[in-house]
Image (cartoon, rainbow, N blue to C red):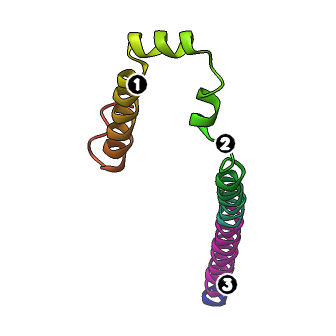
Amino acid sequence: MLNWFVNRWNDLIDIIFSVFLDVWNFLVDIFCFLFETIFNVVISLVSGLGTALSSVSVPQYLTFLPESMLNVMSIVGINEASVIIVTALIIRFTLQLIPFIRLGS
């Protein structure tokens, strides 16, 4: 008699554990689905951003600046400064791709 009760109790524990695992897997799947959906939306927005900015040309806007302003910009070294900044950003983003070289950033 008592053996039957122990078997039913173990069956109940197994069922509860199975339901818990199923609910856990369901919640993980929902989280992954939401995460993937958000990333798909972000990817579509970023891919559309490239086509939206393709008509913007920086040299076109530099021709509208007065000659004196262009002269001052070349005297102060805007070209060299922008090259240094862009190079530093490229190096930083490249180092971010290496897993153990993050250096706190």
Q: Residue at x 68, y 51 (%)?
A: 49
| Front disc: 2 or 3 | 2
Question: Residue 31: x, y in percent?
Answer: 68, 61
Q: Which residue is mark 3?
A: 5
Residues packed near mark 3 inside 10 Å, few (<14), some (14 to 19) or many (20 plus): few
Residues at marks 2 and 1, CA–CA distance in whole angstroms = 19 Å
Contact, mark 2 vs mark 3 (Cβ under 8 Å):
no
Q: Can you say which quadrant of the picture contains the C terminus?
A: top left
Q: Amino acid at mark 3?
A: Phe
Q: Which residue is mark 2?
A: 56
Question: Residue 64: x, y in percent?
Answer: 66, 25
* Nearest to N terminus: mark 2 or mark 3: 3
Inspect the magenta stretch and tell me whether residue 22 lies in it.
yes
* Nearest to N terminus: mark 2 or mark 1: 2
Inspect the magenta stretch and tell me whether residue 9 lies in it.
yes
Q: Quadrant of residue 96?
A: top left
Question: Residue 26: x, y in percent?
Answer: 70, 71
Q: 55 or 66: nearer the eye?
A: 66
* Nearest to N terminus: mark 1 or mark 3: 3
Q: Which residue is mark 1?
A: 79
Residues packed near mark 2 inside 10 Å, few (<14), some (14 to 19) or many (20 plus): few
Main structural element of the magenta stretch: helix, strand or loop? helix
Q: Which residues are magenta?
A: 5-31
Q: Quadrant of residue 84?
A: top left
Secondary structure of the residue carrying numbered label 2: loop
Marker disc for residue 58: none
Residues at marks 2 and 3, CA–CA distance in whole angstroms = 77 Å
Secondary structure of the residue carrying numbered label 3: helix
Q: Amino acid at mark 2?
A: Val
Secondary structure of the residue carrying numbered label 1: helix
